[in-house]
Amino acid sequence: MGLYLIESYLSDMEQLWERVAALKEADFNAFDKQVQKETDRLKSALNSGTFDNPRATIGLEYEFYGVDESFEALRRVPRTVFEHIGFGKELGLHNAELTTSPQPLGPHGLAAIQNAVQSAVLTAQATSTRCEPIKLASDGFWTIPPSGETAVGYLDSAAERYGVIISSNMSGSPQYHAQSNVSTYEPQCLIDTPNVSFHSRTIMPVTLTTSIQPHYQVPVAADLPTYFGYVLRIAGPLVALAVNSPFFPPSLYDEDATVESVLTDGHLENRVLAYESVMRDPNKPDKVRFPRDIESMAEAVDRLAGDPPIVPLELDSGDRFDDQFAHLRHKHGSYWRWVRPVFEGPSKSAANVRIEFRPLPAQPTIRDSVAFLAVFAGLVHGLVHADHPVVELPWETARENFYKAVSNGLSADLAWITANGQRTSNTEEIYADLFEHTQRGLERQGFGPEDAARAFRPVRERVDRRITPASWKCDRLRHHAEYGETLATAVTAAQRDYLGEQADTLAEGVFTDWAGV
């Protein structure tokens, strides 16, 4: 049996190398011609109202990583177990992703999403306990590598054959591996942030990150530019509340990095900067970036069509309605803006336009993550309905807000325009206005006043207490350093504190109930 498994593995690897090598020879011109045909077809369907819907709808993508039974070291996730109960694979072998079914924006829809995530995670925990000693962690960054391995070794483990390099710890999708091998777009595979300079042979360093991605389905497709503009302007304030990746695995730090330099010079949301750095092609416009405003649906489609593909393919038509736009949908898979529109639907009646909000890291608990979905959806709905003047905040300022939040979290000096048209950088005024319109947006969608307030209270309490998951981790790092720990041992100890608190609170608790908050 052992010999059979080895032979099967070698056969699978041989096929993977061959398939990635074939992708390197894809016909870019043929792919581009299909994209142009589909672009006109999609614009026509949008203009005819095919993508309009009777009400706003929400959804959530939620990424986890596996840890061993003691909630410490990273673990590769058993695919057969987790896919059987609804989890999909992600880029890294240690990742598992859950995508909820779309739900109407309302109290029952939000509850359905929370219940679905809680059920799946609890089932996964129970199933893995019977099959393999593994648990799921909800976090922005992992920092403790698998037992007996270093993060550098885990992220850079790879083999080369036929001029193709295959990462040892990446999921076996040819398209994933092709991203490190094709010439149409060549990621630099480099993390270059304060205290860390790490170059890999593949894009594996992005698997340090895990995220939540709230979705908001726009009722009338023609209104996409308005909704999109508001989402860009709330990005900074929401990221400031969500920051959760202040530390890298210790073996990635530069030799001269110290606890003090990490706390002083480091960023609170390294996930954003690491992803941008790793996936940057120095010779092409950045694919991972804060996007500009859009003026029309047509412009949104044209941006997607004009984005350089990483792995161009000629695809067969399928049975879904949006298979009419299969090549555009394929391009969307590497259209990595921090806010991006999506045009899809399995049938004509289900065709929709949604906005994916991508910069948020996974949160300490499921209830915290769902609370961010409530804030995102309620706030967007509330701001648009109120015709709120913050949409007039210059795009350049919205972008500055975003990267200030990435660096400094709730300490960031953000700019906002309140409902009465006054510009402010006062934290209390910004979030008072933001939460007031979240409340209004949720109430307009059927929430009672108390239910609406309860839905986003875990997020609101972070402002009241001036704390985020990242600042909590920094406090734990300081604590361990004061007791004489080195940077490496203090980072590891702080991560163990985080996973230890999460062990009993992931499914039902909230971050603001943790010790030290």
Image: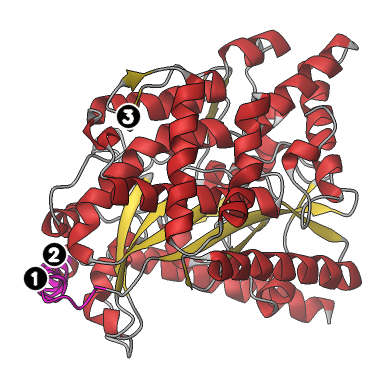
Q: Secondary structure at mark 1?
A: helix
Badge 3: how crowded within 10 Å, few (<14), some, or many (20+)?
Answer: some
- The answer for how far apart the CA atoms under marks 3 and 1 are is 31 Å
Q: Which residue lies most toward the front here? A: 449
Q: Amino acid at mark 1?
A: Asp
Percent of width and height locating residue 142: 69, 41
Please state which of the two labelled residues, at mark 3 or mark 1, is closer to the viewer. 3
In the rendered image, which residue does mark 3 sit on?
Answer: 399
Quadrant of residue 216 within the rendered picture: bottom left
The one of 10 and 301 positioned closer to us in this rendering: 301
In the rendered image, which residue does mark 2 sit on?
Answer: 29
- Write the start and end of the magenta stretch as one range: 32-52
Badge 2: how crowded within 10 Å, few (<14), some, or many (20+)?
Answer: few
| Left or right: 417 in relation to 297 | right
Q: Amino acid at mark 2?
A: Asn
The one of 284 and 446 positioned closer to us in this rendering: 446
Percent of width and height locating residue 426: 45, 17
Q: Is residue 243 above or below residue 86?
A: above
> What quarter of the picture does the N terminus occupy?
bottom right
